[in-house]
Amino acid sequence: MESIMKTQTSTLLLRALPAALALCVSAGVNAQALTIDVVNPIKDGKVVFEAIGPSQVGGAKQGRVSLRMGIRNDGATPLKITKVEILNQLASNFLAPVEIAPGTQYAFQNCNCDYSNPDPNAPDVPASYPIIISAPYPTTVKVAVYVQGFANPVIKNLPFTAATNDNGPLRFPGKASDLRFNEAWQTSSNHVGGSQAFGLDNSVTGWDGDSWDDKRPGADPTKPEGRRAYGLPLYAMADGIVCEGLNDLPEWKNYPRVSKEIEPEPVAPSTGQYSAGGNFLKIQAGNEVALYAHMQPGSIPAELLVPGAVVKQGQYLGKVGYTGQSSGPHVHVHVSQETSPGSCEGNAVRPRPMTFAQLQSLTRGEATAMASANNMDPTDWTALSNHSAPHTFSLLYPASTPYAFDAAETDNKTFLGVWRASDEIEIRVNKPNWTAFTQKRAELVADDFRLEQIDTYVENGDRHFVGVYKRGTGAGALYNASSWSDFTAVWQQLSEDGQRLVDMTTYLSGSTRHYVGVFRPGTGNAGLWSHTGFSAFAAQRETAKDQGLRLIDMESFDIGNGQRQFIGVYRAGSDSTALWRSTSWGGFTAKWAELSDDGYRLIDVDTYVDAGVRNYVGVFRAGSGGKALEAVKGWQGLYQSAEKYAIKGLRLVDVQAIE
């Protein structure tokens, strides 16, 4: 009865009004010729949004709503849309009403999208806006489309829920275990572009004492390897299969980027084409296809470049690079719905939300204020589960426990690095205790990396362990002994079991000396000797040569009373070798250059102070190809140098911290 009375009242009013005004009021009926069809993102019959982190410490968790819809005119006359609202928030920014002809449809998406402008100097004009909501989340989404000449919008209400990816929550593509102290990943969920509406551009930032900076301390700002993210490993967000990949697009030569006239777009030798995504992998999980873009050339394992290759969540994929449409080193990731079953191709108009199982988030603005006052506390971080990054630019720590900030941490140790020609995939690790180091080794071994070099030093009150890993099977063994007799007994047993010692280090823990050895599968004779004094050590080397053994590694340590113990690791060989000791870095590098010209390559270096004078000792073997030797300050400095030389086709073969 109530609805009948309302209709009668409206009719009476219309009879008393002018015709033009009557047309406006009658719009509620005529506008029903317009139909709203939300097509993405939809899952299990519901419109889904991306749950994201809060915009401030202690704030409510939020959600990002970016919908694609068809707005269809089923009537006989044109209709003009003036605005679109989602959940009572403005989603459109029409510069003029959008006309929809009878029987046609207008595709609309609310995203961080701008109108194209031929004038590059003109300010960007938003075409639409993503919608941000706060928890508790509504269970219904209201879409309202306003039409010119009609008083009331056309409204559609649909069931609404938070998204979860096809195979469950994703794993963030970077690991906390690869970050250095006072570092975090950084990004915002407010990605530009319709096809990448839920994408993330991830880089790394670190506290430099004054601000959060993506540049390594003391780095060259004109080199990509000077950025903290450059060269960091990337990992699979979900189980899946490889659709396609590219691994040989050269990186940009200039940083920052310059115009195409100065530096044309590079092409990949394998395709003869430029790739906007740089070196990339596309991996299908369920009916979703994930893109990992802008990776380093040569960093993707060959087996992952084969379509159909199986990928497991958390598996190594490649390294952060500077390729394709990239303004600087970062990894871009986004997920799209598969175009059609079995196509293994993401649909550009069907972007999907991404949510991660474990993240800690903190807005960059708040992190800056807290770090500046040295009161940044682990409780300031928000633990996220099945969420993406906040809309506000934020720091992310991909772990179950909060980020521990310590403004007093320093990175001032000097390292000696030795490089030789190689194209192996390399990962470098620095951990502040033995437990963390062995945990990271187990993780990398399971991912087909093998430890080849080890060293140790003390800084910030922690005993650090440094490891250099290369891609390959045959993990070998790692052993830490608290006595020389224990170490040699294990060396003997492992040798009989087909393992060969390839590198070692030694250190004091209290009054106990530890000996740490890296073993790899191998055959042939081997030797391990310890002598007091350099002369006895050098004499043993000559004796070993006559036995068909070659020195491959040496360590030394002070034993008091002005004496020093020297340990030599030997493997079967017949090539020419050299051993050189110098009492100055200048003298050592000069001899290194001379021996390099004579066809030798440095494979191991040791340094120590004897009678107040620093000595440098090098082990050389016959070899060819590129080489490098450098003393650098800080682990960040060594990492940058390693990436600098990697670009030139060199890999780290020895690292020595100066104690």
Image (tube, helix red, strand yellow):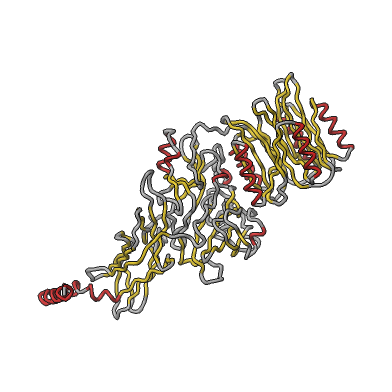
Q: Is residue 440 left or right of residue 200?
A: right
Quadrant showing the C terminus: top right
**Residue 60 higher or lower than 537, as above or below:** below
Residue 321 horizontal/vertical position (percent): 58, 51
Residue 546 horizontal/vertical position (percent): 89, 37
**Residue 218 higher or lower than 651, as above or below:** above
Q: Quadrant of residue 488?
A: top right
Q: Is residue 114 left or right of residue 554?
A: left
Residue, x 73% and y 50% (percent of image)? 474
Q: Quadrant of residue 76?
A: bottom left
- Identify which residue, 592 or 176, lies in the foreground: 176
**Residue 15 higher or lower than 522, as above or below:** below
- Identify which residue, 271 or 289, lies in the foreground: 289
Q: Is residue 63 left or right of residue 656?
A: left
Residue 258 in sight here:
no
Quadrant showing the N terminus: bottom left
Residue, x 68% and y 39% (percent of image)? 454
Residue 241 horizontal/vertical position (percent): 59, 63
